[in-house]
Every structure is written in C-alpha cells, then in structure tokens.
Amino acid sequence: MNTEKIIILDFGGQYSQLIARRIRECGVYCEVLPFDAELSRIQSPSLKGIILSGAPDSVYADDAAKCDPGIFQVAVPVLGICYGMQLMAHTLGGRVEPAPKSEFGKTELHTDGTAALWKECPADSIVWMSHNDSVSHTPAGFTVIAHTDSCPIAAMACTERQLYGVQFHPEVLHSVYGTQILKNFIRGICGCSEMWSAAAAADTVIQEIKQKVGNKKVISALSGGVDSSVSSVLVHKAVGDQLTCIFVDHGLLRKDEAAQVLKTYRETLGLNIIHIDASERFLKKLEGVTDPERKRKIIGEEFIRVFEEEAKKIGTVEFLVQGTIYPDVIESGGSKKAAVIKSHHNVGGLPEHIDFKELIEPLRMLFKDEVRALGKALGIPAELVNRQPFPGPGLAVRVLGEITPERLRLVRESDAILRDEIAAAGLSNSIWQYFTVFPNVRTVGAMGDGRTYDNLIAIRAVTSVDAMTVEVAEIPYTLLQKIAFRIVAEVKGINRVVYDITPKPPATIEWE
C-alpha cells in the first residue's frame, strides 16, 4: 500500500490522464478520480496533493463540471491546470471571462521567477496553451506569478493556503519545462519523497489478486499482445494452475501470428492455453458492417461469448482476466465528461451482461511503458515485452469499410512486407508501432504496358512512450521506396502506397 498519493480530478479534458503519466514519470503514485468524487473518497492519510485537470467547459456555464468546494479546504496543496485554474478562481471569488484573445499552441510564458512552481525553470520559456476563457481577476489572497503577451494572468498562487493555478498545460511535452513544474509541485510543494514504480508494485498486485480469487478458477483473454501477456503472467503468479488462458483466433490476426503466439506462450512461459479458431464465426458477424464503432462492439461481444462458452467446459469460472490499460479506458470515455474517441473491445465494447462474477484488470491504471517495465520485472522475455502494440479488434480496425477475406489478405501481405523490411533495417526497436491500412480507396495505375484500377495501401509508423501522444516515425526515404516497391510488386491487387504523416493528436494511432 502506498503511503504517498496525488489525486487528479478529471474534468474531461483531452490531456487529463497525461497528467498522471507525467507524475508517475517523477516516481510518485497518483490516481485519477471523477471531478465530482466525494471528499470522503479523496481524503486519506496518504493524500499529499490534488490536481484539477483541464476541461472543455466554461466555468460560468450552467452545466459546467464542478467539484466539491471543500477541495480547497483540504489540508494539502492544490494545483489547477487550465480549466482547473479557472474553476479555482471562480469558486473562490475571482472572475473568469471569455479571453480577449484565445491562445492555442506554443506560447512564451513570462514568470516572476520567485514562486516555488518555477524552481530550476528559466524566467521565460515555451508552454502549451489551449483556452478560450481566462481569469480576469484573481480571488482574494492570490498573486499573479506569470503572464503571456495575450494572457495577463497565466498563473496564480496563494502560498498561505497552498493553492496554485496555471493556465497552460505543463503535462504536454510542448511545455518545455512542464515536467519540472509538475515535479516542483509534487516533490517540493506537496513534499512527496517516496519513489513509486509499476514494477515495484507487482507484489502488492499479486497479493490482491490472490485475496480476490481465493480457490476459484480464472480464465484469461490472451491475445498475444503485451498487455494481455503481462496480465496473464501476473495472474498466473498469483493463482497458478487455477488460471486457464484462452487464445481466440478471430480471423483478424496478422500473418502467421496464431502459430507464433501459441509457440511462445506454451514453450517459453509454460501457460495453460486453449486455442479456439473462431475466425469463421467473427467474420460472419462482421459481414456488411462498415461503422467502426459497430465493428468494435461486435468483436467485444463475440470475444465474451466465446470465453463464456469455453469457461462452461472448464467448470465454474467466476473471473475473467483482461489486459485493459489506461489509454484503453481514456479513449473509451473514462469520465462523465470525457468524449468517447473510440470504444475498445475490452472496455466500451463489452456487452452489458457477462457470465462472470468479476473482471480482473490488473493493468487498468498503467500506461504502456509501465506495463513493459512490469513485464520485464516478471521475467517475461524482452522480445515479447517489447513487441509492438496490436489492437484487440486486430485487422478489423485496419480495414476501413466492410471486412472481407480479400481485404484482409491485402493488409496481411502488405503488413508482413513492412515488418520484414523494418526488421531488416534494424528499426524494430526504435519505432513504437508500424502497420499497413486498407483505406478502401481504388486508384488508377500503370503496370507493365497496361492500365490498372486497384487498391491503395497506407503505411502508418509512429514513435511514442505512452500511446497518449505520438509523433510520426521518420523512416528513411530510400527504405520507404523499397517497401512501397515490394508491396506493389508482390501483393496482387495493390497499385499505390501512401505514408500517413499525421501525429496524435489530432489523429489516433489506428485509423478506426
């Protein structure tokens, strides 16, 4: 059990969970709670500080997200970020109004240089702004500690009450000294001294699983990806032979993936695995479906139904293990105010009724790099832990429009070529994720002496740490040319290859 904790109240901002990621980078444990969480849920002996996230609301709107005003009376420091700062000002008697000039993007911040938030930061630095409203008058007892050319009150503080607010987003990497500012708050102002890591917390999680499961049977939804792998090994260490892993081939895997997954898990990790070939069943259910959300819902429900059927063959099974991680929860709408970007099959894609007493999701509060660190600590081979992410719905979200065997063939074959060339170039470990997409577009081409009217394939390759934000991988142009040439020459039905150069945000990693 952690003796030091930072609580983040999530008001639905697009960067809310990224705050948690940055705090954990600083080695401090934190939890994200909904903005309207009761004070009794927030307060605890381990509480060291509270952070109020951003939000799309205006604080003066009738339906604006509001927290319990008692937050500002709790005897720990509070930091408001963007909307959080505006809410602090509005609640405590200040004034928030539409900004004379909105700020979006990189902005130069000018600080007073003396506030505790700015320790080891220059007086002038670049920060990331994203707001239409701003604080026009601070509450009584607050002083202005930073400004920009367009925002006279870009940060404020009431040191006597340990209340701080910043209009910018220190959690975004574009804020050059953002991590230092957060560290100044949690380490300096809040006084956190312990060092937390996901790997160090493994023993606690294992004990919690043992206590929850007792002598009951458990099944694990093993996909072969990093998340389900680490979840399964973690639960196996807790309950041993009480765990049965079920690997479902839904017909949406990459080329030769099923055979590779089964070999690795049986021979390397010694897990008890049942292999179910349900490809025909899944593809039948997906016939004619073009809406990406509907695809995810169908796949999520079918996964559960297969698990339920197999569980009955094993006997009475009360628990289902899933490799849900934080980004899955975030994009599926993790709070009341958060937009559902896309439902993940293991979160928003689950059916309302499942024949299990409870889900076990040991990684639900962890980011991808934390999952990898935990996997290494559990002794999982590096080649498995460092495997690039693969979505639960598989190639279903890489085939835009209706899913057909022919379209799956085009993606599988082109993806295999891409992976082969990336590995040959020695770039496998430097690119976070790389794959091909079938955009459902046909184009005119010329091959040999004839005209073609065939399919387009897109390449997506990105770098990231936590899957919350990504940058486009800069694959050498000569390598891209080689990959494109091979795909067109070797995959019948493709006559054009394009490269997706859009970061996240505004795009997501997957196309659907």
Image (cartoon, rainbow, N blue to C red):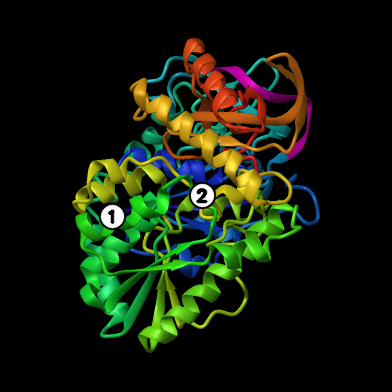
Q: Is residue 452 left or right of residue 267?
A: right
Q: Does residue 309 appear anywhere in the picture?
A: yes
The amino acid marked with disc number 2 is Pro
**Residue closer to the observer: 274 or 224:** 274
Residue segment shown in magenta = 96-110
Residue at (46% x, 45% y) in the render: 255
Q: Quadrant of residue 179?
A: top left
Q: Secondary structure at mark 2?
A: loop
Q: Which residue is mark 1?
A: 263
Q: Position of residue 491 (x, y in %)?
A: 58, 31
Residue at (36% x, 63% y) in the render: 362
Q: Which residue is mark 2?
A: 391
Q: Position of residue 171 (x, y in %)?
A: 49, 34
Q: Secondary structure at mark 1?
A: helix
Please, is residue 328 above or below residue 353 in the view?
above
Judge the density around disc 1: few (<14), some (14-19), many (≥20) Cα neighbours within 10 Å.
few
Q: Are marks 2 and 1 in contact (CB under 8 Å)?
A: no
Q: Does residue 161 appear anywhere in the picture?
A: no
Q: Quadrant of the C terminus?
A: top right
* Structural distance between the alpha carbons of marks 2 and 1: 20 Å
Q: Position of residue 3 (x, y in %)?
A: 27, 58
The amino acid marked with disc number 1 is Lys
In the rendered image, residue 15 lying in the magenta stretch gets the answer no
Please, is residue 5 above or below residue 151 in the view?
below
